Amino acid sequence: MLILVPVSAYIAEIELLNAGSEAFLSLIPEQRSIVNELMSEGSIISYAVSGDRKKMWCIFEADSELEVHRIIDKFPLNAFMDSTIHKLLFHNMHATIMGSISLN
């Protein structure tokens, strides 16, 4: 018997440490590349960084909190991050409410 575990939404609230350091800044292009890849796969739903570069928030779709931790562990900036993860009851976005636009 196959049992399917529904995918849930999680938010990671991430404190960015030493965000102005040369080591941190040198990893930003690789971080953006990984995030873009994870967004195209659907693992990351949204990604935001505060204007002062001290906080970051990511919404993930994952099977478990452990899976979210595993994804964050792959971030190039992981050594500069202290994260707290919360399971969400739901996550609505403008694009989900409006649907996608078809040019056909």
Image (cartoon, rainbow, N blue to C red):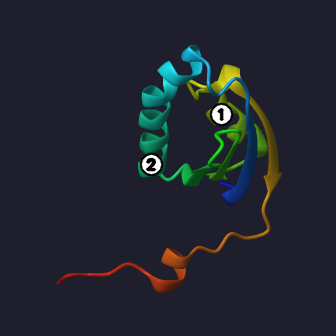
Write the residue at 42% across / 29% down: 29
Q: Position of residue 79 (x, y in %)?
A: 68, 19
Q: How many marks?
A: 2
Q: Is residue 99 above or below residue 4?
A: below
Left or right side of 47 for 62:
right
Dot 1 falls on a residue whose secondary structure is: helix
Left or right side of 84 for 44:
left
Write the residue at 68% across / 60% down: 6
Q: Is residue 20 above or below residue 47?
A: above
The circle drawn on residue 72 is 1
Left or right side of 13 for 36:
left
Q: Position of residue 91 (x, y in %)?
A: 68, 69
Q: Is residue 89 above or below residue 66?
A: below
Quarter of the picture containing the N terminus is bottom right
Task: Measure the C-alpha gap from mark 1 to mark 2.
Answer: 15 Å
The circle drawn on residue 41 is 2
Q: Residues within 10 Å of mark 1 (few under 14, many from 20)?
A: some
Q: Position of residue 65 (x, y in %)?
A: 77, 44
Residue type, label 2: Glu
Left or right side of 39 for 104:
left
Residue found at the very far left of the displayed protein: 104
The circle drawn on residue 103 is none
Q: Residues within 10 Å of mark 2 (few under 14, many from 20)?
A: few
Q: Position of residue 16 (x, y in %)?
A: 71, 33
Residue found at the very far top of the displayed protein: 23
Write the residue at 69% across / 41% down: 68
Dot 2 falls on a residue whose secondary structure is: helix
Residue type, label 1: Ile
Q: Nearer the viewer, mark 1 or mark 2?
A: 1
Quarter of the picture containing the C terminus is bottom left
